[in-house]
Amino acid sequence: MASRILRALAFAAVILAPLSAMSQTPAPPASSTTSHLLQAVELDQLVAPIALYPDMLLSEVLMASTYPLEIVQAERWVNTNKSLKGDALKAAVDKQPWDDSVKSLVATPSVLAMMSSKLDWTQKLGDAVLARQADVMDAIQRLRSKAEANNKLQSTKEQTVTVKQEQGKRVIAIEPTDPNTVYVPYYDPSVVYGTWPYPSYPPYYWPPPGYIAAGIIATGIAFGAGYALGRWASGGYWGGSVNWNNNNITINRPGGGNIGNNWNRGAHVEHRLGSGNRGGRHEGLNFRGRNGQQVLRPAANPRCGFARRQHMR
């Protein structure tokens, strides 16, 4: 009798063992292709409002987005000092402790105000630039190609659009027609890019200022008054662009030298953003955690300006 019971228990163990193992086996992770697709979709969503900015303005926006607290400080400072104009304004900005990219945007107050008021978007953009710079640049080129194919991106009296090949890669560059004047483009992403293919990830969009005719926005790109950059360029603030060949932001500050870690004020933004940091952490960079705290970067080279930035709540 006892032997029958033992044989029965052994048989049950053999039958149930595979079921137990199956119940403990974790579900397979999402494929890397799916993960990459989701990240690309989210990046398209994020850069949609600025992808058609001229490259020199785009480079400053991308850099400044990594300093969201300073964006807010600068915008508040501008509102408090509205009486300052021209050279007096620039001289006062020179004395502020902000990053040069943030100082540059004082010359384009509508952009500075947008980034300050849309702080959640600005922080997300800054995170993306820090962690996935090359992919951010790819997203911008994807959207420019969409706008061009939709006949919404073309040269105007405000800006010059150039399509070129760089090492076998097709890129679309946008530059001010007058290098001393920048015009901020206003547009509805659903109009300029055509049908948005990701309904679960609609593009970020904010209505333009009231002085921009709604009829123009409904059909394409509108431009506000031009911002003169002459006096700002002399201070070394403006002059940025994008090296589309290497997907790097370029800040051409006059008079700068090599100050460490491949960083050159006339070359690539690598002292903070790294070179080609696609899909992973770049050595020497720490990224914001889930609690939203901003980047803490090592101060190994004081000339590189590494510093702690506090979280803006």
Image (cartoon, helix red, strand yellow):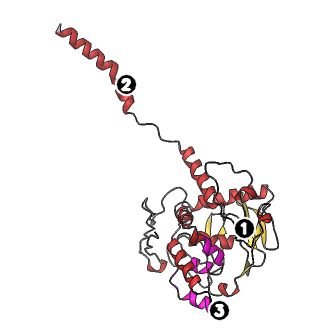
Mark pair 2, 3: CA separation: 77 Å
Q: Check disc 1: other Cα within 10 Å, few if <14, some if 14-19, many if 20+.
A: many
Label 2 CA crowd tier, 10 Å (few <14, some 14–19, many 20+): few
Q: Residues within 10 Å of mark 3 (few under 14, many from 20)?
A: few
Secondary structure at numbered mark 1 = strand
> Is 139 on the left or on the right of 263, as rendered?
right
The residue positioned 50% from the left and 83% from the top of the image is 97
Q: Which residues are magenta?
A: 85-114
- Which residue is at 70% across, 57% downward? 143
Task: Please say if the residues under marks 1 and 2 sit with CB atoms less than 8 Å apart.
Answer: no
Residue plotted at (58% across, 81% down) = 103
Q: Which mark is residue 19?
A: 2
Q: Which residue is mark 3?
A: 87
Q: Which residue is mark 1?
A: 186
Q: Amino acid at mark 3?
A: Asp
Above or below: residue 236 compared with residue 32: below
